[in-house]
Structure formats: C-alpha cells, structure tokens
Amino acid sequence: MIRVEGLTKRYGATTVLDGLDFTVAAGETLVLFGPSGAGKTVLLRALAGAVVPEAGRVFIGEQDVTDRAPEERGVGMAFQNYALFPHMTAFENIASPLRARGLGRDAIRAGVTDIATLLKIDHVVGHAPKALSNGQKQRTALARALVAEPEVLLLDDPLRNVDAKLRFEMRLELPRLLAGRGATVIYVTQDYKEAMALGDRIAVLAAGRIVQIGTPEEIYTAPATVEIAKLFGDPTINLLEAVPEKDEGGVFLRISDQRVALGADLGAAVGRACLAGLRPEALSFAAAGIPVESEAETPFNEKTVTLALTRRRRESLVSRPAGTPGPTSGPAHVAIDPAQVLVFDRETGARIALGQGAAAEAAA
Amino acid sequence: MDHATPLERWLRGIALALVVLFFMFPIFWIVLMSLQTNETILRTPPSMVFEPTLSNYSAIIAGRLDSNVASMGIEFMSNLKNSIILSTFSVALALLLGVPAAYAFARHKFRGSEDIAFTLLSFRFAPPLLVLLPLTLYFQQIGLADTYVGLIWVYQLICLPLILWIVRGYFEDISPDVEHAYRIAGHSWFATFRRIALPLAGPGIAAAGLLAFIFAWNNFVFALVLASADKQPVTVGALAFVTASGIQYGQIAAAIVLSIAPTLALALYAQRYLVEGLSLGAVKG
C-alpha cells in the first residue's frame, strides 16, 4: 500500500507537485496519466526517494518513509530512459538488487535467469547495455525492477521508447506479469490506451495536481473536465458550444434546431454557456435527426470514422463499427444517444452532472 | 572521411607527418645530443655523423660530472627520485581529496558551492611567486620548509584544482538516474559512488591524474624556493649542469631524456584512457 499526504515539490519558484493526496491499495495498479510537465516523473521519484519533497509525507505499507534513503524503501523502479549501468552486463544489471540483498551466487543466478526467461531476454543477459536493442534494454530495466520482488513497483513510462509492435505485446503481457507478483504498482504513461489497458485506477495529473482519480471506465464515461475528455478517446471527443434549455419536456440542447434531450439532473446547466461533449461513438447515422453533410470517411481497422458538418459548418466525427453500412457523401442525419452526452461548463471546463460536488471540486 | 580522394589522403598524410616532425624533432635532437660528447655537439658545422657514446648517461647515473677542467659530484639520480616521490604523492593526495570533492560539487548543489569551486580554481590563476614569499616564512616557522610533506602540500595548488575541475565535468556527465537506479536497487550512497560513479568517471580521472602528474613533474619555482638540494626535483637539479667551466650540453641532454622518460612512459600507458576519456562517449549510458 502506498499513501501520499500533501506531497509538495518545488524547483525554485515553480511548484511541480502541489499538495498531492492519494492512496494506492495493496496489489492495485494505479496509472499516472497526464501531459508532459504534469509532474508524473517527479512524483515517482519522490516516492522512490530520488527527489526530496518540500512538504508532505509518503507511506509505504504502514511506514512513513519520507525521510528514508532510496535504498531503505524496498521499492523497484524502472526509469523511462532505462538508466542501465553502462559498465555492467545485462546480467549484472538485473542482479544488482539481489546483490544488495546479500544473496549467494546460486540464488542470484537463479533469480536473474527466472526473470530474464520470463521477459524473454535470457539469451542476451551476457551483453553490455550498449549491445542491446531498445526493447531489450527496456526489458532489462523492467527485469531489474522486478527481480527482487519488491512490494512497490514504480514504472516510469517503460514503453515509451519501444516500437509499436513490442509496445502492444507488452501492454498485453504486463498486467499478467504484475498481477502475478501481487505488487502495488504505480505506472506512468502519456498514452491513454496504455492507461486504460493497465490501470485498475487512473490518476490524471495536470500542473502538479490530481484532476481526477478513478477507474478507466469512470475516466472515460464521466471525465471531470473537458481536458480529460479530450485526452481520453481516439478519435477525440466532439465539442459543440451550446446553451442547455428547459421546458415542460425537461432539459434539452438545441443543435441545428433539433432538440436533444438531456437527463433531468442537468438542471444546473440550464442557461449557462456550455460545451456539449459528444463522443464519436455516441453519434450514429439515422433516418431522422440532426441534418449534416457527410464530408469524408476514414476507415480504421475496427471502426469507420466519418467527418460530418452540421448546418452551421461545425465539424463532428461520427464513428461506427467497421463493415456496417454508412451514408454516401452528401446530406445525412445523425442521431445522438442522450445517455452519452457530456456537458461541460465553457468557462471552467468542469463537467456538469449528477455528481455536482465532484465537478465543482475539480473546477476549484 | 570516407569520401577522401587519394590526393586528399596523400596531402593529409604529408600534413600529419609535418606536425609529427615539428613536435618530435626537439626530442629527437636531444636524444642525439645525449649520445655525443660536448666537443662533437659544439663543432661547426654541426653534423649528424658522430660516434655514439653512453658516457653522458654513465656520468649522470654515477653522479660524477667530468668536464675538461674539473670533476664534480651531481645529485641527478636523487633529483629524479625526488621528482617521482613529489609528483606521485602529490597526485595521489590530490586524487584522494579532489575526486570526492568533485563528486560533491557535481551532485550536491548548495548555496555557495559554485563560489567554493571557483575559489579552488582561482589558485591556478595566482602567480606562484605571490604565494611563495609568505609561504616561505610560514614554512620556516612551522618547520615544513625543505620537507616532502611541505612540498606535496604546496603542490596541491597545482594538482587539486586541475583534478577537481576535470573530474567534476565527468561526474556531471553521468546521468543521475543511473545512480538513483543503483540506490533504489538497495545500495548505499557510498557503494553507488564506488561502483557506479567512480568506474564511469574512470577515464576522466585517469586523464586528470596524468595531466596533474605532468604539471607537478614540470614544476620548477615551488621546489626552487622551498626545497634545498636533497629534496630538489629534476627541474631544479638541472641547474647544476650550468657550471663555472661551461654548460655540459651532453649531460643536460642525457638528463632531459632520463627525466622525460617516466612521464612519457606514463602517458603512453594511459593513452588508452586518455583517448577514451577525452572523447567522453564511453560515459553516456
């Protein structure tokens, strides 16, 4: 278990971590997600003890480790730039945590061989890091973090520098690997697919603060802010400016003179300048609905995305499963699934929804 | 480089040969002189044809300087020994003090750390004579004048800043993440310094040590003022060849050959590290 209370780190006048509070349960995988410079790496380093915070406490298990040296925290960490020891072979790199724990020669050999075989680098452990490919370096770094079976694993964007094929493979393998060890994992990434695939929960970081923390499902279907909604999802969410209205039929949006019903709980949004967030899969072509011009189509493997223009020349992306029939170019109609409409305050970017409290908190 | 035409390669060869000739000729000439007697050296016109003799070397090693008028004892071999003692211990001490200091300056930025580092470097700017006058008085007072310890201490003015600043640059080039990774693996900071920082900065340390050794070996004025005959290094000892009955060119040449031999041997031995160290690529992970 990891618990962080009020963690703050400043470099000169810049506050990189701004009073972070969160808990990661034992055996859970928490993904830290956010743009460059959000403080993800600094947070990981502060947990590992490589960066000394100005304020706040870090607990691992039940123990306060804030003032402990990195070697006394018993964590495993894989660095984004691998940070392999260039003057040692891959074997010695992987063996270093075992050597520090004073294991005998046979135990070290067995431990290294096990993890190297698991990560499919057993054939290159005799090589120097220089002689390894990026994928092999990344696996060596991962093996070094895993080999001593630490209770806490900190993985800093380990898949960033590997090619697409290997990244995909590792994205499939990693959850199994991590679950098998029962370690508490904090995983940093800038790739939302990786975040969704690996995280039990995702913490979205921006400018040193946690903007939202929740399951991948929650982050995707109920993003706290419009920024998060834009970061998760490919193609990105459609955002249309609109002012929700209310009549005896309930709350609704007016898009191209068509009425789009909203949930009754969105009363708070009535009359406010809002952004309607429509995921491409919340839209579908139908016999009736909002009139659009179908402009262009891009087939992906599993879906086809159509660029459609509303009457006011606003661009929207509509996606549908590949192979299903779509409109020919020209006039068409789009239907909106009202349950999937997200409404954000245009000024603050916060989502207006059932959980008004949560949205207000995120906006603060 | 690969696209050079034969003509370019040929011209480059000539240019390199000229450079080598330019730098090696004085050494070559001195080796020739050391194998001649004073008479053959001074004849006009000079000639490359002579009967080689080892008499200069034997005179120096035996410690007897024979000129045509008189014969006198010289201490050249003990000068050589002094040079070796002074340079070796100075560099060893400077490495012992300078390498940890360089590491501290590279890794732990604190208030005033740049100022301290710069002050240490500024020792190299001061003209030695400025330091020497007060130092002579102090050394006589506290009994350090004319001792190896005193000289080695003063030699730190030469060696320490050099080692500190060169090695610091090498430490700064090592990614801090590599050290963090070693500590997170469970090793103490001292083990990290010894197993990660030192080996990775090794070529730089070797290069700095070698340079410091050469600078210490070539030092003249500190030893001239602070040491008497039995502690003097070769640079000062060479003065003895200027005698009342003339300058003993042959013996000077032989003495020079003997005195550059250790540094030359050291440089050749350390060349591998020097090239590695100065090209730096080896340090990056």
Image (cartoon, coloured by chain):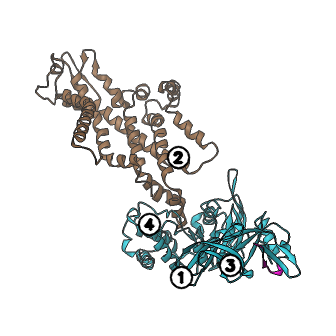
Q: Considering the numbered disc 1 on the image, is that residue within a helix, a strand or a loop?
A: helix
The numbered mark, 1 or 4, whose residue comes first in the sequence reads 4
Q: Chain of mark 2?
A: B
- Which amino acid, mark 2? Ala
Say whether residue B217 is left or right of residue A11.
left
| Magenta segment | A256-265
- Which amino acid, mark 1? Arg
Who's brown, chain-wise? B
Residue matched to label 1: A176
Disc 4: CA contacts within 10 A as few (<14), some (14-19) or many (>=20): some
Say whether residue B135 is left or right of residue A67.
left
* Residue at horizontal 21 percent and vertical 17 percent from the top: B70
- Which amino acid, mark 3? His
Q: CA distance from mark 3 to mark 1?
A: 44 Å
Horizontal and vertical percent for residue A204?
A: 67, 69
Front in this rendered view, residue A30 or A324 = A324
Horizontal and vertical percent for residue B146?
A: 43, 30
* Residue at horizontal 86 percent and vertical 69 percent from the top: A271
Horizontal and vertical percent for residue B8?
A: 25, 40
- Which amino acid, mark 4? Asn
Say whether residue A34 is left or right of residue B132.
right
Say whether residue A356 is left or right of residue A76.
right
Residue matched to label 3: A333
Q: CA distance from mark 1 to mark 4?
A: 22 Å
Residue matched to label 2: B101
**Apparent colour of chain A:** cyan
The numbered mark, 3 or 4, whose residue comes first in the sequence reads 4
Q: CA distance from mark 3 to mark 4?
A: 48 Å
Residue B100 in view here: yes
Q: CA distance from mark 3 to mark 2?
A: 74 Å
| Foreground tag (3 vs 2) | 3
